Amino acid sequence: MDDQTWLIVLIIFIVSGIFGYLSLVIAENKDRESKSWFFLGFFSWIFGPIVAGIVPPYKKSCPKCGELSSYGMRICTHCSYEFMGKEQVK
Ligand SMILES: [Zn+2]
């Protein structure tokens, strides 16, 4: 490969990294597991952040009242039940 080809490969790699990072940040804001989102953005470019923006935030159901709470929450927003750890994820 000549110098120009390497430059194009480098640019593609950087753009992939930017889209991967964007997907990761959006997914993390929604309490979603972020590593797989990085790779989604890395390989699908603009579709990674778009899909990360469309999907609803991760929710877990409260064992006491059955309502859904944000995955990162330690206390149920509906009945103040304190989550022990690995609750059922929906
Ligand atoms: Zn609850």
Image: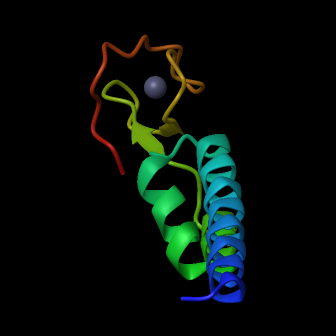
Residue at coordinates 50% horizontally, 16% vertically from top-left?
74
Q: Quadrant of the N terminus?
A: bottom right
Q: Residue 39: x and y, percent?
A: 47, 63
Residue at coordinates 69% horizontally, 65% vertically from top-left?
14
Q: Measured along the vertical axis of the image, is residue 12 above or below residue 90?
A: below
Q: Residue 19: x and y, percent?
A: 68, 66
| View extreme (front): residue | 2
Residue at coordinates 66% horizontally, 71% vertically from top-left?
10
Q: Measured along the vertical axis of the image, is residue 87 above or below residue 82?
A: below
| Quadrant position of residue 55 | bottom right
Mark count: 0
Report the front residue among 40 and 31.
Answer: 40
> In this rendering, would 89 be left or right of 10?
left
Which color scheme is applied?
Answer: rainbow
| Quadrant position of residue 31 | top right
> In this rendering, would 57 be left or right of 29?
left
Q: Measured along the vertical axis of the image, is residue 59 above or below residue 36?
A: above
Residue at coordinates 58% horizontally, 51% vertically from top-left?
57
> In this rendering, would 72 be left or right of 81?
right
Q: Residue 23: x and y, percent?
A: 63, 59
Q: Residue 65: x and y, percent?
A: 40, 30
Report the front residue among 78 and 3.
Answer: 3
> In this rendering, would 41 be left or right of 83?
right
Report the front residue among 17 and 31.
Answer: 17
